[in-house]
Amino acid sequence: MDTYKKIIEDIYLDVKEIEDTGKVANYIPELSLVDPTNFGINITTVKNENFGIGNSDTKFSIQSICKTLSLTLAYKLEGEKLWDRVDVEPSGNPFNSLLQLEADCGKPRNPFINAGAIVVADVLISHLKNPMEDFLNFCRETSNIPDLNYSEKVAESEKNTGYRNVALCNFIKSFGNIKNEVDEVLDFYFHICSIKMTCKELSNTFMYLVKDNFKTQTGKEVLNASQTKRINAIMLTCGFYDESGEFAFRVGLAGKSGVGGGIIAIHPDEYCIAVWSPKLNKKGNSYKGMCFLEHFTTKTASSIF
Amino acid sequence: MDTYKKIIEDIYLDVKEIEDTGKVANYIPELSLVDPTNFGINITTVKNENFGIGNSDTKFSIQSICKTLSLTLAYKLEGEKLWDRVDVEPSGNPFNSLLQLEADCGKPRNPFINAGAIVVADVLISHLKNPMEDFLNFCRETSNIPDLNYSEKVAESEKNTGYRNVALCNFIKSFGNIKNEVDEVLDFYFHICSIKMTCKELSNTFMYLVKDNFKTQTGKEVLNASQTKRINAIMLTCGFYDESGEFAFRVGLAGKSGVGGGIIAIHPDEYCIAVWSPKLNKKGNSYKGMCFLEHFTTKTASSIF
Amino acid sequence: MDTYKKIIEDIYLDVKEIEDTGKVANYIPELSLVDPTNFGINITTVKNENFGIGNSDTKFSIQSICKTLSLTLAYKLEGEKLWDRVDVEPSGNPFNSLLQLEADCGKPRNPFINAGAIVVADVLISHLKNPMEDFLNFCRETSNIPDLNYSEKVAESEKNTGYRNVALCNFIKSFGNIKNEVDEVLDFYFHICSIKMTCKELSNTFMYLVKDNFKTQTGKEVLNASQTKRINAIMLTCGFYDESGEFAFRVGLAGKSGVGGGIIAIHPDEYCIAVWSPKLNKKGNSYKGMCFLEHFTTKTASSIF
Amino acid sequence: MDTYKKIIEDIYLDVKEIEDTGKVANYIPELSLVDPTNFGINITTVKNENFGIGNSDTKFSIQSICKTLSLTLAYKLEGEKLWDRVDVEPSGNPFNSLLQLEADCGKPRNPFINAGAIVVADVLISHLKNPMEDFLNFCRETSNIPDLNYSEKVAESEKNTGYRNVALCNFIKSFGNIKNEVDEVLDFYFHICSIKMTCKELSNTFMYLVKDNFKTQTGKEVLNASQTKRINAIMLTCGFYDESGEFAFRVGLAGKSGVGGGIIAIHPDEYCIAVWSPKLNKKGNSYKGMCFLEHFTTKTASSIF
């Protein structure tokens, strides 16, 4: 841990100073109002060591990072049949997404693009008695944060500007790949994306993707070994929108980003690291976050490749 | 090695018996005439142990697997500037390829789709005095096979049916991303794809992507550590056409396939394994090869995730 | 008229006998339940002569033919500014429609594809006090059919299966090109498409696109001369989905088809002819209707070219 | 004719003065070096009256206008089978062209986009003994210009920059829809596009699309009545690239433009009018030419609609 700590401190100071050419997401007020100078990092190792720096204890909107949790629960409940509903291939240019959805008859390319995460939400609704409550309980159990909650404000804002997501969900339903009511699916989906966590909470929460026999505080297994590997594989090939190849190339870890400026990255059997800096590069991933992680895996020589 | 050996033998016998729903590539005679029942495997470990089974000593057309070698040499010669000419992102649906090339102004999505491998060939021509000879010498040195050679017959066949590649090369040149004459670039490209090797030769050759300080017989470094990781990352995200996500998901190794039915797969710091079975699945990758590797990483629990 | 009459009778008998390889639209019960052997024709000339044959007095669902009436009223109310909201270009392959909508920033290619007709409905809502009632009154006035009405059953059916149209409308709204509530726009749009008429009523109604100084029974002008020409031009280039070029080529008249199997065709200063036969060809236009019209303009040598 | 003359003079003077926001085509020297202030018009009526104004007697590169002549000869020689090789549908966004070609299995959308004109050139080569000479003789006969000739300079320039056309031709050949050698087809195609004419020569030449029983000086029929109508229909729906709908809408005539800034427009049974002004609008059609023709058909109330 001491090595990691020293390296993180050094890179943190360096990257803090670089000019940030990114832009804060502004399509909903809750995202646009965040202080853009926030910069936090937290690492949790397989030995349960923990180290944070900067704004590592400040809550922020984790947005799409939470798609990893909804995917995890859907995979747990639906098993391998899940992949009949959503594929595991990178999606190429975002601009092709609707075209691809049409060519693929309504089966989204992967569970991390919006189309795929909406199908995952639909799968969860089909399995859960009280989807909103049950999913929240799963997140609380997995993260060990008993008061974790949705942000109604964020969910509401998404709803009011989410015409594209409404379009997407109806388009997929026209192919028969949404089984529940569009309104219910989207309401749930917007809530999933509304959760807030700190970097520290994030790196602790996703340890279930790092450790082989991870158990929650109450002794529950989240995923088995094979499922864990597969989620990590999807994160590596699809976790950063149209920049997934670049992340694998420059950073070399499985990971997932969110438009709130957060990134989690997984080194199986080693560590989970969470970074947060709100300004996004052109592909929609945290500018300083990407930068930090590239330096981090280079200096620690800890890519999975 | 004994564990690997036992597992390989078992899976080999199992997979040999399954019904092969794939089809042999038939666009050129040299590929269509191969015996479809060929099935060979060879593993080389970081300790230089070697084990082969089935037709592991039969030469076959490695086709696109050789794009890893041309990419390696181009990266060595051009350095990071190479990525201004070709990107490192998975390409999505094959069907979008020309559309994407247009949207991306002639910069191919990655070096393993045809468009990208053609640009890599162009980069090599700009650097090498005698491209054909010099590249062959690089391959001989890296593989330690002094009599390795192009198959003029295969190169000639490709040339006679390769209207799409001619289209592709001219299209990229219209954007200024091909610097040499189209005819020369394609002739070189077709020769690169014409090389033949055995499974054993393949798993030995690509050890430079497995070992950290790999040196050739004559003591030369092929790539440095950072470059090696990056080539592996591109193989993982882009090595299997439109099935790259599936390969990462099911197999969990960096790898590269060819339409001759060969696949190489890399576990950094552990081993390189080569599989060959000529019948291809719908996505153009060896049906039994994919099948074998999925079982292999499951039983050895040796995915990189 | 006598010439037209004789020719129509002859072709009617011929085409009635040919094998109809088309298929009745079946996405809503109201369309699928129609008797597929229905076949009717009615012509109205500039001299107000009228001739019908077959099922020319049977009401059927005119579907997209009614988009000509909604476009007419929107053009009347909004003037040339209408073309800032919707373009006048043929749309190419249907399969590109969403891609084109994205590339064109939410401006539909023309008012006859669904996307365009939905924008036209939105424009009408912005202008009309009681959109449903006011549009119906416009149709009654123009057609001189005082009891013309919406079919609630058809509108309801469309609503229940129209996920793609919901997707389309939300997608356009995400670009800001729908000003009213999605639900209201679609409800109105589905009602517009639900109107039923006979061939005779159709050929009478659309005489306002044939005669230069057409006045309704109560003496009102529908469109001025320049506007009339422009609607005819759009019908010629865009009236038959992906078969518009074929219709211009084979028939050579301005026209508009509907999935109910109806077609109206306009020869400026000469006549309007309406044909109805429910079975549709692969492009979604009446198989026998297209066939009849091709023979008709050939034998009467009355194409506009 | 006196009415036409007066109107042409008036509009000529008006349009001459307007600011021309277009740009001269500059991809080959022969086009970029033309004086951008050239502006000429010539009308030929069905009564063989002729009137020209401005630079109506200056030769310029007619470019794609000549595709009407090659299409005419191919239609004459191949008959209706021609439409198995090339479709008659407008092509939508230029940007989709390769995508459409792929979706349509190498059958170009219409004979006026480059892909289609290249297939037409291929059809001509299959029919003609000496394609270059025979086509030129056909043009000389039809235009009654005995010394009409190719511009070797223009053809050569096109060849040297035409990578996209080489790409296109090879791509179509990969689908089997080019029967002759790519080099020969393109060489012929580039020559077809290299012909120069004056406005006066153009409006005289294309009278075969205006008059019902047109005969050349030596008494030959060019096309029969049905074929003539069909060529006019294709010109109307496809003659102006991605602005064909707009031309039908604003001008209302069949027509064809070229990147040299020329436009011919046909009013069947009435007249052919040719306009030339080198600066092109964003869609690649003459800015002042479009402007002039819109005013002309408005003031003469002579659209075909």
Image (spheres, coloured by chain):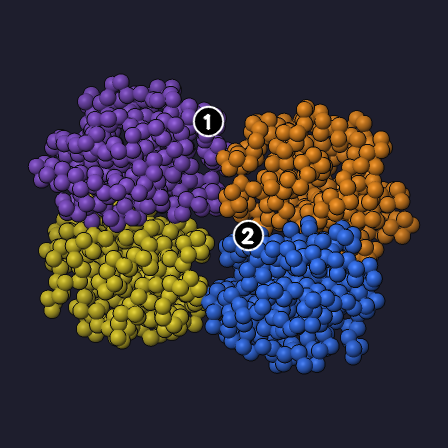
Chain colours: A purple, B yellow, C orange, D blue
Q: Residue at x 72, y 53 (%)?
A: D295
| Pointers 2 and 1 within a single chain | no
Up-down: is B152 above or below A228?
below
> Disc 1 sits on a residue from what chain?
A
Mark 1 secondary-structure assignment: helix
Q: Nearer the viewer, residue D240 or A122?
A: D240
Q: Which residue is mark 2?
A: D93
**Residue at the right extreme?**
C2
Residue B294 percent coordinates (x, y): 27, 47
Which of the image's four quarters has the N terminus of chain D? bottom right
What label does residue D188 carry, if any? none
Q: Residue at x 38, y 25 (%)?
A: A154
Residue B13 percent coordinates (x, y): 25, 52
Left or right of residue A158, residue C53 in this image: right
Q: Nearer the viewer, residue A289 or B230?
A: A289
Q: Which residue is mark 1?
A: A160
Indicate the amino acid at tag 2: Asn
Q: Nearer the viewer, residue D139 or A64?
A: D139
Residue A276 percent coordinates (x, y): 25, 34
Residue D249 percent coordinates (x, y): 68, 49
> Disc 2 sits on a residue from what chain?
D
Up-down: is B170 above or below A38?
below
Up-down: is B277 above or below A47?
below
Indicate the amino acid at tag 1: Asn
Left or right of residue A109, residue D9 in this image: right
Specify few, some or many for label 1: CA neighbours under 10 Å numbering under 14, 14-19, or 20 or more. few
